Image: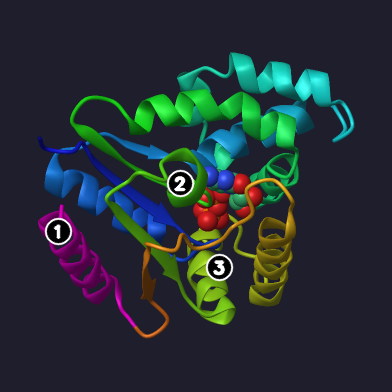
């Protein structure tokens, strides 16, 4: 019996996992879910509605009623939305409310590619291919700064680095589904890799892993 091809990409902020996940999804003709966008949407709506992080029932309601159109809002890709996302992502009730959708997406017929923080550990621990993408914080901050400075020319690299460090710390130390590498994940450190080389490595990992089930 062939197993459904679920490919899980996890890793810290701006590690390149999103780019790699979309290339691999295209290679295999699989649907892809950027789970960070879901948390960004909840964080963004929290701020827009003036809710605090203590307003848990309202935050859960936002998570339960999130519609996929919200995910197209370009503001979700901004710097603030990343910080807001990481704040709501530390609330277990919010994570629970978003879980079913992600599990169902991962386990659809034929398979799927997902990227996030807890795909290989919580959402799809059964995924046959798990890649944990990382890079040194300074390198990740530089990549993220290059993206963000296009829309905010005054943005300082040091501020982006501080954001990334704060988010890494919060995402790794939270009690509910902290960022961690699954035991059976393959580590891909992109610190010294350009985008093409990183893609080549990811393609090889997927090929090797696919062959082994
Ligand atoms: O793109 P970037 O790596 O900056 O972040 P993202 O993947 O868009 O995720 C934004 C935030 O959402 C992260 O800092 C996490 O706190 C949270 N997140 C999570 O907790 N679990 C996921 N599966 C995906 C994102």
Point 46% across, 21% down: residue: 68
Please give the name of the residue rendered at 14% of the width and 59% of the height, measured from the top-left corner. 212
Q: Nearer the viewer, mark 1 or mark 2?
A: 1
Whole-number angstrom distance, CA of label 3 to CA of label 1: 38 Å
Furthest residue in direction front, as rendered: 1
| Residue 153 visible to the viewer | yes
Question: Are discs 1 and 2 less than 8 Å apart at CB?
Answer: no
* Helix, strand or loop at mark 2: helix
The question of residue 198 being in magenta is answered with: yes
Q: Which residue is mark 1?
A: 212
Q: Is residue 109 above or below residue 80?
A: above
Nearer to the camera, 66 or 123:
123
Identify residue for label 3.
Answer: 145
Residue 109 x, y percent position in the rendering: 22, 25
Question: Which residue has dot 2 on it?
Answer: 119
* Residue toward you, 32 or 19: 32
Q: Is residue 182 left or right of residue 49?
A: left
Q: Which secondary structure, mark 3?
A: helix
Quadrant location, the N terminus: top left
- Label 1 environment density (alpha carbons within 10 Å; few <14, some 14–19, many ≥20): few
Magenta region, residue range: 193-213
Look at the numbered disc 2 and say if its residue's Cβ is closer than 8 Å to ligand 1: yes
């Amino acid at each position: 019996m062939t197993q459904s091809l679920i490919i899980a990409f996890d890793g810290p902020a701006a590690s390149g996992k999103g780019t790699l996940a979309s290339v691999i999804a295209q290679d295999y003709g699989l649907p892809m879910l950027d789970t960070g966008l879901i948390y960004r949407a909840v964080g963004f709506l929290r701020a827009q509605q003036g809710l605090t992080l203590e307003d848990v029932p309202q935050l859960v309601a936002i998570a339960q009623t999130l519609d996929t159109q919200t995910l197209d809002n370009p503001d979700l890709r901004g710097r603030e939305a990343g910080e807001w996302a990481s704040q709501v992502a530390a609330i277990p009730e919010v994570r629970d409310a978003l879980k079913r959708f992600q599990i169902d997406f991962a386990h659809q017929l034929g398979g799927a590619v997902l990227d996030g923080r807890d795909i290989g550990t919580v959402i799809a621990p059964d995924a046959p291919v798990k890649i944990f993408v990382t890079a040194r914080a300074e390198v990740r901050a530089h990549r993220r700064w290059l993206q963000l400075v296009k829309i905010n020319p005054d943005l300082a690299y040091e501020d982006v680095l501080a954001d990334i460090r704060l988010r890494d710390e919060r995402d790794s130390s939270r009690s509910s589904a902290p960022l961690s590498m699954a035991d059976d994940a393959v580590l891909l450190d992109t610190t010294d890799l350009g985008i093409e080389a990183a893609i080549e490595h990811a393609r090889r990992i997927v090929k090797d892993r696919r062959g082994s089930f």
